[in-house]
Image (tube, grey):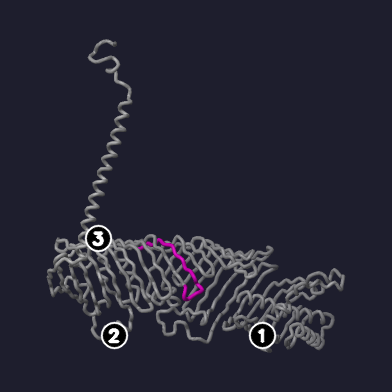
Amino acid sequence: MNRTLKIILKTVAGIVVLAIVLVIGGVVLVNSKAFQQRVLRQATEMLSEKLQTTVKIDSIDIRFVQQQVRLYGVHVADQQQRPMLTIGQAGLDVDIREILGNKVVIENVELSDASALLVKPKGEPGNFQFVIDAFAKKPGATPDTTTTSPKNKKKMEFHIRKVKLSDISIKYNDAQMNLERADIKGREAIFLTEAQLRLTTDNNKPRKNAGKPKRGYFDAGHLDISSHLRMEINATDKDTIRAELTHLEARDSISGIDIRDISTKIKMANKQLWLSDVNVQQKQTTLHIDSAQIHLPSKKDSIALSYRTGRITGTAYLKDISRAFAPVLSRFTLPLNLSLTMSGTDSTMSFRDVKVSTSDKRLTIAATGNIKELKSKEKLNITFNVKRMYARSGIKEKIISMFPVKRMMMKQLHNLGNISYTGSFRIIRKEERFWGRLNTAAGSLQFLFWLDERNKYVVGNAKSDNLDFGKVMEMKNLGKISASAEFKIDISKPRTAVMRRQKGGKLPIGNVKATVNDCSYKGIHVRNLDATVNSDGAVATGDIKQHGNYRDIRCSYSFTNTDEMHKLKVYDFGLKFHKISAEDKQAKRERKEQKKQAKRELREQKRQAKLEQKLQDEKEGKKKRTKLPSLKGIFGGGGGQPQ
């Protein structure tokens, strides 16, 4: 859209200037209103014939003494006779004498009350394409050689000193841009500009977050952005543009995007864009980008968009983006210091050397990440690998308190103490998956779980060899455990709401199946337990079973509050004797064989160690025998004389 608008605006300017030049050329010797209007009609007829559409200019006013030209009521229709371009007033302060020398020097341009209607259906040419085609150089065209005058061969020069725009409206399909005012000042190709504009879009469809309160308000089909900018541009070098954006603010009243200031230095050449010293200020968030390089796309040269940045640093307040992208962050006021680099294309993004921390370092994160298939809603893939995360006791609870979620098992979270984490998470359409190793003050835990957004469940498994479960759950008789577990928790609001209304309760709704390899209860080690937990939100019930070769032990239990696990009720204790089953016999034989194999391997290791020691001793003995003989060996024993 930007490239198309650029071409259209250039073409519109060409139409206006061409009309003025044609008129001035005809009236430069005759300064009468009647003759000016006559030449004006001839000029509009020429434009209409060239464009093959209706071109109309209501009136013109040329003042030779003041060297001013005013056009009133410029109308250009598209080929469907829709009003494509309308200009209320176009005024120029021009050095008329220079026109005869093939040079147009415009001291001041004023354009006001103008509107453009640009329509481009998908896969079809726009309603403005005929204008571009009319002024484009035809392939294979040869220069006009009907005259040999050097003056006629000379290309007309244009120089504009100052441009003032006001009340400009451009509609492109569903997008509407209103330019309240813009002042462009300069000499030759160096100029300053200041502008205020408004961009609105309405695709006549429901908003994307309609009926989805968790979804952000940003929707490209529904925008209302007001902005103000100041910029200095230098285009004196051939094929190179340099600019400095000193101020840009933009606010979208619908989505809540609020950019207070952007400033940067810009260089563009050879379809590449370089940015340096980029500063971004939101309500509270501040970011600084050392540098960025962007390869602009080109279908003609088969070049895709790509970019990379230098170091990005700053302090982020996630609340600043909550309304637009993540309402769940609306209360997240904790400032986060960040540092990273970025690169990518129009369909990928890569984040490298990502570092996030709180000011007091109670939370530190180091990670890398990638986003793939940005253009596909179904294939979008976000993956982050957390190299290191450390959270001191207290920061976890503080972060959770900033989310509008039901807080469960906060005591248990606190009892974990300081935690560190290494792992990854991946987000694919309707599923978020997390895995890795969590080290805590109460022991370590390996886990894998995922959020099934289609069916609304949290499903996963966890394993630990040394978790102090009694400390975490505040059950003093229970010590460390070695266990693995699978779990499934219901996160559907409609389903859980029904259960809450029926039974009340504060427990999560779901089930757990666990295998306890070893645990300590009142100082006694217990092994090979199978445990289950089934919770309806109000009461959690379960069974513990120990299967032996000749007997089974079973008991049931229940609890209603995870914060009072010491009040757990145990009942229905049972003991059952039985013959050893074929499976148990086979398992017993396998255990015996494993023990025998372990003993054989141990004996072999000891034998190998003895052999290596023997070889080492023999090697050291040879070294001793190769030493020089002692004086006693040379002169003989006893103190006698030499032989």
**Which stretch is magenta?**
363-379
User: What amino acid is found at the position of numbered circle 1 in the picture?
Assistant: Met
- Dot label at residue 465: none
Give the residue pinned by disc 2.
498
- Tell me how far mark 3 sits from mark 2, CA to CA: 38 Å
- Residue bearing mark 1: 84
Q: Is residue 594 left or right of residue 431?
A: left
Q: Position of residue 235 (x, y in %)?
A: 66, 66
Left or right of 566: which side holds 302? right
Closer to the chain start, of discs 1 and 3, is: 1
Q: Quadrant of the C terminus?
A: top left
Q: Quadrant of the N terminus?
A: bottom right
Horizontal side of 208 relative to 586 (left or right) equals right
Q: Is residue 574 magenta-colored?
A: no
Q: Kindly report which numbered mark, 1 or 2, lies closer to the viewer in this rendering.
A: 2
Residue drawn at x 66%, y 88% is 82
- Residue 567, image x and y in percent? 16, 73
Q: Please provide percent x and percent y for residue 281.
A: 48, 69
Identify the element where label 1 is drawn: strand
Which amino acid type corresponds to the residue marked 3 in the rendered image?
Asn
236, above or below 556, in the image:
above
User: Mark 2: which amino acid?
Assistant: Val
One can see residue 167 in this view? no
Residue 570's place in the image compared with 641, above or below, is below
Q: Which comes sooner in the sequence, label 1 or label 2?
A: 1
Q: Residue at x 55, y 82 (%)?
A: 200
Residue picked out by circle 3: 466
Could you say which quadrant of the image residue 369 lies in?
bottom left
C-alpha gap between disc 1 and disc 3: 75 Å
Is 324 in front, or is 71? Answer: 324
